[in-house]
Image (cartoon, rainbow, N blue to C red):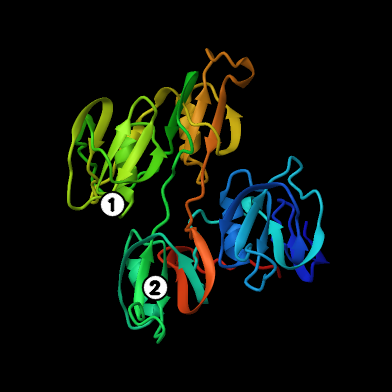
């Protein structure tokens, strides 16, 4: 059954599955914020909401917003009802809904480029190109690149004109937290990648590499930490703490000094092989709290792992065993996921620059421009 309505000056179609592609111009959904990101346009903001497990709807502050510093900000929102508590007129914003029920691609195509928009930060390399088209091609061909900014021939910025800045954001799952907990098992989706050979892990046990940290993440094991280091183009080595599950990513191309430290494991990244041990491991007594998509009842952790691996939205899971002290949650298989699509750390207006994303997903999925019809 299809229903067509006119609201917020956009004509939209709703289907019986609950898929709601409605974009409401100059309409705000006040309150209910859960996370805030920067987005170059409303379509990108809607995709962020779609990938964030608990997001039901959003409000995006457009490029023409001038009242305060919320320009290009994407406010992800959630409510127990799945619907906004109120809707108010507000010039310069667009609101809409998650596309989770629309069977979206987990790796959307982001082919749009943005004139006079800068994606600030997250640079890992730069070089000169003739135009922004070549810059986008370079980003697409570099596996580490998620988005870019190109500086045109601006006479005020002679040292950076014609320069292409390649930028990185996490495109692999990151557990927001890792904790010890009785009666649970956690693990990861085991989607295979046959194009790469398995890595042979070579670690420095009970060893710390002090200093040079640029980011700290939570990891389930030293193998998991090594995989995170290998994914980031700036990571030259890492240290993992088994007591606090902290994965310290480090960048120093000139020095590597070690010291003995009980419980720490250090190592270097591997760029040309696939890490499989951390994916295959079921972590007994370890919880991955948060990032829940949904839960189903399963008889054991193996069934939970298979359920996660068969769901394209699931990246990791936690299973509550029969011996858990939380009796109400026993046999629950919690499927979990986080945003892995490119997300610039900041978006601002700047003349004579062009920004955009890698288009490596576009051949498979086609352009992903969300709009109502």
Residue at the (39%, 35%) spot, across then down: 219
Comparing 189 with 299, the one in front is 189
> From what the image shows, is residue 182 above or below residue 239?
above
Q: Split into 4 quadrants, where in the image is the C terminus?
A: bottom right
The residue wearing badge 1 is 195
Q: Is residue 145 left or right of residue 95?
A: left
Q: Position of residue 217 (x, y in %)?
A: 40, 40
The residue wearing badge 2 is 136
Q: Is residue 189 left or right of residue 31?
A: left
The image quarter containing residue 359 is bottom left
Q: Position of residue 309 (x, y in %)?
A: 46, 39
Residue at the (46%, 65%) spot, across then down: 120
Q: Position of residue 303 (x, y in %)?
A: 48, 28
Mark 1 is surrounded, within 10 Å at the Cα level, by few (under 14), some (14 to 19) or many (20 or more) other residues, namely few
Q: Split into 4 quadrants, where in the image is the N terminus?
A: bottom right
| Residue 99 image label | none
For residue 114, say whether it is visible. no
> From what the image shows, is residue 88 above or below residue 139?
above
For residue 159, say whether it is visible. yes
Q: Is residue 4 left or right of residue 160?
A: right
* Badge nearest the viewer, 1 or 2: 2
């Amino acid at each position: 059954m299809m229903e067509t309505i006119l609201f917020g000056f956009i004509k939209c179609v709703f289907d019986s599955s609950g898929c709601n592609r409605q974009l409401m111009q100059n309409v705000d959904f006040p309150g209910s914020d859960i996370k805030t990101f920067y987005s170059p346009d409303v379509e990108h903001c809607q995709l962020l909401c779609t990938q964030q497990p608990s997001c039901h709807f959003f409000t995006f502050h457009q490029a023409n917003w001038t009242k305060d510093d919320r320009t290009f900000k994407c406010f992800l929102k959630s409510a127990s009802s799945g619907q906004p508590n109120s809707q108010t007129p507000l010039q310069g914003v667009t609101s809409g809904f998650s596309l989770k029920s629309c069977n979206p691609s987990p790796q959307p195509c982001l082919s749009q480029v943005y004139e006079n928009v800068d994606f600030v930060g997250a640079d890992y390399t730069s070089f000169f190109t003739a135009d922004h088209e070549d810059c986008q091609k370079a980003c697409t061909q570099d596996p580490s690149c998620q988005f870019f900014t190109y500086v045109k021939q601006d006479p005020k910025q002679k040292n950076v004109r014609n320069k292409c800045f390649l930028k990185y954001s996490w495109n692999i799952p990151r557990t927001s937290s890792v904790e010890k907990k009785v009666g649970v098992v956690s693990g990861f989706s085991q989607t295979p990648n046959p194009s790469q050979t398995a890595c042979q892990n070579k670690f420095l046990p009970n060893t710390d590499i002090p200093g040079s940290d640029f980011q700290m993440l939570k990891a389930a094991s030293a193998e998991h930490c090594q995989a995170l280091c290998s994914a980031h183009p700036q990571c030259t080595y890492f240290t993992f703490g088994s007591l606090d599950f902290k994965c310290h990513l480090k960048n120093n191309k000139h020095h590597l000094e070690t010291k003995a430290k009980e419980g720490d494991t250090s190592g270097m990244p591997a760029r040309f092989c696939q890490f499989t041990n951390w994916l295959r491991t079921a972590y007994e007594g370890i919880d991955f709290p948060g990032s829940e998509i949904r839960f189903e009842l399963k008889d054991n952790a193996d069934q939970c792992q298979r359920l996660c691996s068969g769901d394209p939205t699931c990246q990791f899971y936690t299973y509550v065993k029969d011996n858990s002290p939380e009796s109400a949650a026993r046999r629950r298989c919690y499927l979990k996921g986080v945003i892995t699509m490119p997300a610039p750390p900041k978006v601002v207006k700047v003349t004579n620059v062009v920004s955009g994303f890698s288009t490596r997903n576009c051949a498979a999925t086609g352009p992903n421009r969300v709009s109502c019809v």
